[in-house]
Amino acid sequence: QVQLVESGGESVQSGGSLRLSCAVSGFTLDDYTIGWFRQAPGKEREGVSCIYNISGRKYSTDSVKGRFTFSRDNAKNTVTVYLQMNSLKPEDTAIYYCAASPRRLLPALCLFKGQYNYWGQGTQVTVSS
């Protein structure tokens, strides 16, 4: 059974930094894609960044490029992925989710929530001005 558990969400001042973590377990093969998504109040859930596990190729939405960095730590049975968020802005305020898809997602698709089968419970990030 695939499980994802996020942590690291906090309240910070504008310009600050946070690192979110997501522990991913349950995949029996290495062929999967992990994504970070966020959902602000009253808005649709949007893709932030994604990584294909085998190649390590990463893709990010334009609004976070240069500020957010997606990384991973592959252990034997659990993969932990991180979203390092710098230069945070009030518009980054949202619940952040990690998600997993049991296949390689093309760059054009990996930031679409409908491509993912498994989701974490989310972690709240609040950025005040």
Image (cartoon, rainbow, N blue to C red):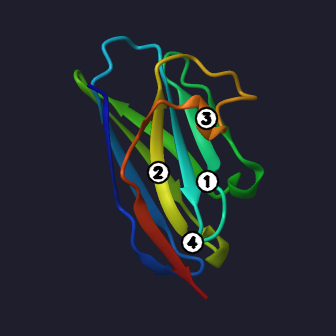
Residue on which disc 2 sits:
97
Q: Is mark 4 in CB contact (under 8 Å) with mark 3? A: no
Residue 74 placement, left or right of 70? left
Residue on which disc 1 sits:
45
Q: Residue at x 36, y 45 (%)?
A: 22
- Mark positioned earlier in the residue sequence (2 or 1): 1
Residues at marks 4 and 3, CA–CA distance in whole angstroms: 22 Å
Residue on which disc 3 sits:
114
Q: Is mark 2 in CB contact (under 8 Å) with mark 1? A: yes
Counting from the top left corner in percent of width and height, residue 32 is at 47, 20
- Mark positioned earlier in the residue sequence (3 or 1): 1
Residues at marks 2 and 1, CA–CA distance in whole angstroms: 9 Å
Residue on which disc 4 sits:
93
Given residues 97 and 42, the one toward you in this image is 42
Q: Work out whether 39 lies above or below 41.
A: above
**Residue 79 appears in which quarter of the rendering?**
top left
Q: Is mark 3 in CB contact (under 8 Å) with mark 1? A: no
Q: Is mark 2 in CB contact (under 8 Å) with mark 4? A: no
Given residues 35 and 119, the one toward you in this image is 119
